[in-house]
Image (cartoon, grey):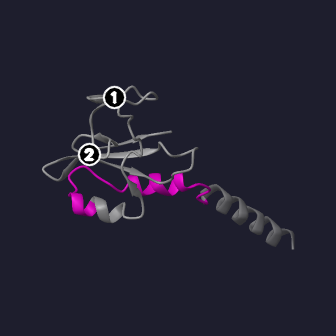
């Protein structure tokens, strides 16, 4: 009986350790599947369950955006505005897993040259 309880407890602890408790964990697992050299179609297949775009709408007072910097890493990205004034990262697709305030600026940034992946990065909220 004690052995069965020990096995059950260890199994439960293992499950609790690997269970995806937030959408971020699953998102990062999928983002990690994207490799340098993949084509855009493969990336879109892997990331089909996620939102596309930064979700940042820039006020009309701002006339031009040339770059954005990730405050956590210091990484700088060339940027511009879409016709709807959403911030866009040049030559990249930005994927998001959530609109919840805690995660709404978690960005999976996949950069392309000629529709081939040349860089993959994660910018946390």
Location of residue 62 (image quadrant): top left
Residue 21 on the magenta span: yes
**Which of the two labelled residues, at mark 2 and mark 1, occupies the earlier sequence position?**
1
Looking at the image, is 102 positioned above or below residue 64? below
Q: Residue furthest front?
A: 61
Q: Quadrant of the N terminus?
A: bottom right
Q: Which residues are magenta?
A: 19-42
Residue pictured at 50% horizontal, 39% vertical: 125
Q: Is residue 93 left or right of residue 107?
A: left
Q: In the rendered image, which residue does mark 1 sit on?
A: 62
Looking at the image, is 2 positioned above or below residue 85? below
Viewer-nearest residue: 1 or 44: 44
Q: Residues within 10 Å of mark 2 (few under 14, many from 20)?
A: few
Q: Is residue 4 left or right of residue 69?
A: right
Viewer-nearest residue: 3 or 36: 36
Residue pictured at 22% horizontal, 56% vertical: 38
Q: Secondary structure at mark 1?
A: loop
């Amino acid at each position: 009986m004690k052995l069965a309880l020990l096995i059950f407890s260890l199994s439960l602890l293992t499950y609790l350790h690997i269970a995806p408790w937030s959408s971020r964990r699953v998102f990062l697992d999928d983002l990690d599947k994207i490799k340098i050299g993949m084509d855009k179609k493969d990336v879109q297949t892997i990331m089909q369950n996620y939102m596309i775009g930064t979700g940042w709408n820039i006020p009309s007072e701002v006339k031009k955006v040339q770059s954005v910097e990730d405050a956590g890493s210091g990484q700088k990205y060339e940027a511009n505005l879409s016709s709807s004034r959403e911030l866009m990262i040049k030559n990249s697709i930005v994927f998001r897993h959530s609109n919840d305030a805690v995660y709404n600026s978690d960005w999976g940034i996949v950069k392309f040259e000629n529709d081939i992946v040349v860089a993959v990065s994660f910018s946390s909220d």
